[in-house]
Image (cartoon, grey):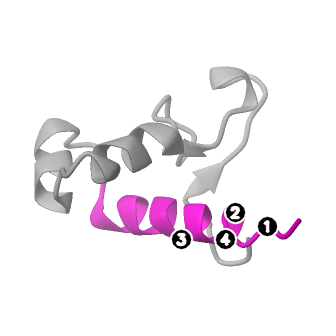
């Protein structure tokens, strides 16, 4: 996942779940909000410590993971 510098993994934060910039905001939360129709503006309004780039990189990380082949 080259270039995804806003997605962090730390076993001491949220048990190592992918989070945004070391905060206790899981990438899965952001993806769930987008999947349920929230806009970037609405997400930032609800979570003002997030930035548009955080949401973009969350989507990019999901796209990267979805490339898994069986």
Main SS, magenta residues: helix
Cα–Cα gap, marks 3 and 2: 9 Å
Q: Nearer the viewer, residue 27 or 23?
A: 27
Q: Residues within 10 Å of mark 4 (few under 14, many from 20)?
A: few
Q: Please tell me whether mark 1 or mark 3 is closer to you in this view.
A: 1
Cα–Cα gap, marks 4 and 1: 8 Å
**Which SS class for mark 1?**
loop
Residue 2 at x, y = what percent? 73, 77
Residue 17 at x, y = what percent? 67, 34
Q: Nearer the viewer, residue 36 or 42?
A: 36
Residue to which mark 2 is pinned? 65
Assess whether mark 2 and mark 1 are in contact (beta carbons under 8 angstroms). yes
Assess whether mark 3 and mark 1 are in contact (beta carbons under 8 angstroms). no
Q: Nearer the viewer, residue 33 or 4?
A: 33
Residue 50 appears in the figure: no
Q: Please tell me whether mark 1 or mark 2 is closer to you in this view.
A: 1
Assess whether mark 4 and mark 3 are in contact (beta carbons under 8 angstroms). yes
Cα–Cα gap, marks 1 and 2: 6 Å
Assess whether mark 2 and mark 4 are in contact (beta carbons under 8 angstroms). yes
Q: Residues within 10 Å of mark 1 (few under 14, many from 20)?
A: few
Residue 63 painted magenta: yes
Residue to which mark 3 is pinned? 60
Write down the region rendered in magenta.
50-70
The quadrant of the rendering that contains the C terminus is bottom right
Cα–Cα gap, marks 4 and 2: 4 Å
Q: Residues within 10 Å of mark 2 (few under 14, many from 20)?
A: few
Q: Please tell me whether mark 4 or mark 1 is closer to you in this view.
A: 1
Residue 11 appears in the figure: yes
Cα–Cα gap, marks 1 and 3: 14 Å
């Amino acid at each position: 996942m080259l270039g995804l510098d806003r997605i962090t993994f730390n076993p001491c934060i949220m048990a190592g779940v992918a989070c945004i910039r070391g905060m206790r905001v899981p990438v899965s939360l952001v993806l769930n909000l987008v999947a349920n129709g929230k806009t970037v503006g609405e997400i930032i309004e609800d979570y003002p410590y997030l930035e548009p780039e955080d949401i973009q990189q969350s989507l990019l990380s999901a796209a990267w993971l979805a490339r898994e082949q069986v």
